[in-house]
Amino acid sequence: MNAFNALRLLVNPVSKSLSVGRGLSVRALSNTASRSFATAENESIKKDAQTAEGLSAAAIHSNGPARNDWTREEIQAIYDSPFLDLLFHAAKVHRANFNPREVQQATLLSIKTGGCSEDCSYCPQSSRHETEVKASKLLERDVVLDAARKAKNAGSTRFCMGAAWREVGGKKTNFNNILDYVKEIRGMGMEVCCTLGMLDEAQAKALKNAGLTAYNHNLDTSREYYSKIITTRTYDERLETIARAREAGISVCSGGIIGLGESEDDRVGLLTTLATLPAHPESVPINALLAVKGTPLENQEPVKIWDMVRMISTARIVMPKSMVRLSAGRVRFSQPEQALCFFAGANSIFTGDKLLTTPNNEFTDDQLMFQTLGLVPKPPKFEQSSCSGGCSHSDAEPKQADAAN
């Protein structure tokens, strides 16, 4: 007897007169349960048949609706699919949910550099590592706004501001200045994103009211590997900040870094956590470590393009409506290699000379790549997220006032 038949026997009605809950008969309850079991059994049989036909997990899982109930085993099977099959089906999912020619251009500015109390093993901004990065104060208003204007003129539709803090708490003056920056940059007709460390509920609401489009708070790696990279902030604290941003109605930008010395199982673990959040992040950055001298990970081997494409492809299939950002480390990949990433479903990049403190691709090189590949800039989206459940991104058109700027 298989498990489904055993479960049917357990819910088989024993009396027409019995009722449960709000007057629901045992027979009605058992019929509902039987239908659920039958559906699950049919899905299981269907997948078994597809597997028997030689279909990869990427093929099997690339046709369904957006889900938040992925199992780690399912995502592992997708990740392990034959490379070309994984790439092909990720491309199909991408084209079903996005214009494949559109790529969002974003600019990232470090508005407060260095001196961070965290011990992130990859980060040159940690005060615990001996690197060439020196601590500085929050950038002045005119410097930040001038950088935002230049970014917009260069084609960026999202401006991201990063501050090397563990948390916003205790930085009232600086935080109020950042709220002002958000309002001003939003008034330029750009999306605005911040990464400022941990937030409390009041801070998240203040950023929402200022017009913040998205909040970035990466998980970095799997829960199991996390403590080998960071000890000054817990995994759950990261998840709590993501939840506070979501609850405030701000879009979530959260992803991770590969090349930290983690296993493929850890990469799958990261994707599983992201794909099983109550709502998928609207933006999922996939970073390849750029090892920096003076950090504990300075001798890590560079990430291979095949690993990057495999991560992007899997992320695209399990989070079909999220923007997948080809982020740090892109500078190491040639234009043909980046083309593979775009084909796999990456539809967002950072442009500009540097990403916080590490180098980035030349602006002219990116322009040439866009021309060669026929890519076009993705228009900004200003509606902030307030979704829950299966909602995974914001598709609202720009408000007229913003679009006119």
Image (spheres, rainbow, N blue to C red):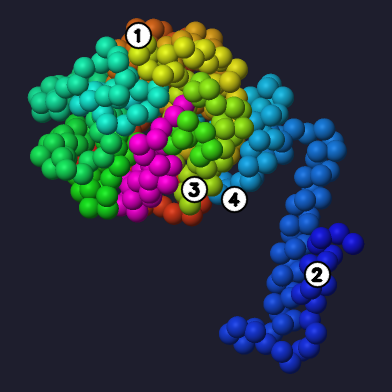
Residue, x 42% and y 46% (percent of image)?
Answer: 236
Q: CA distance from mark 3 to mark 4?
A: 9 Å
Q: Of helix, strand and loop, which one carries label 2?
A: helix
Q: CA distance from mark 1 to mark 3?
A: 35 Å
Q: Amino acid at mark 4?
A: Asp
The answer to whether residue 397 is visible is: no
Does the stretch in magenta take in 242? yes
Q: Nearer the viewer, residue 359 or 375?
A: 359
| Comparing labels 2 and 1, the label whose residue is closer to the camera | 2
Check disc 3: other Cα within 10 Å, few if <14, some if 14-19, many if 20+.
many
Q: Pointer 1: what residue?
A: 362
Q: Amino acid at mark 2?
A: Arg
Q: Amino acid at mark 1?
A: Glu
Does the stretch in magenta take in 310? no
Q: CA distance from mark 2 to mark 4?
A: 23 Å
From this viewpoint, which residue is outermost toward the right?
1
Q: Of helix, strand and loop, which one carries label 4?
A: loop
Q: CA distance from mark 2 to mark 1?
A: 62 Å
Pinpoint residue 140: horizontal percent, then vertical percent: 10, 26
Pinpoint residue 88: horizontal percent, then vertical percent: 65, 25
Q: Residue 208 has which mark? A: none
What segment is highlighted magenta in the picture? Answer: 229-257
Task: Point out the tag, 2 or 3, that comes first from the N-terminus.
Answer: 2
Q: In the displayed structure, does residue 351 sit left or right of residue 136?
A: right
Q: Pointer 2: what residue?
A: 8
Q: CA distance from mark 4 to mark 1?
A: 40 Å
Position of the N terminus by quadrant: bottom right
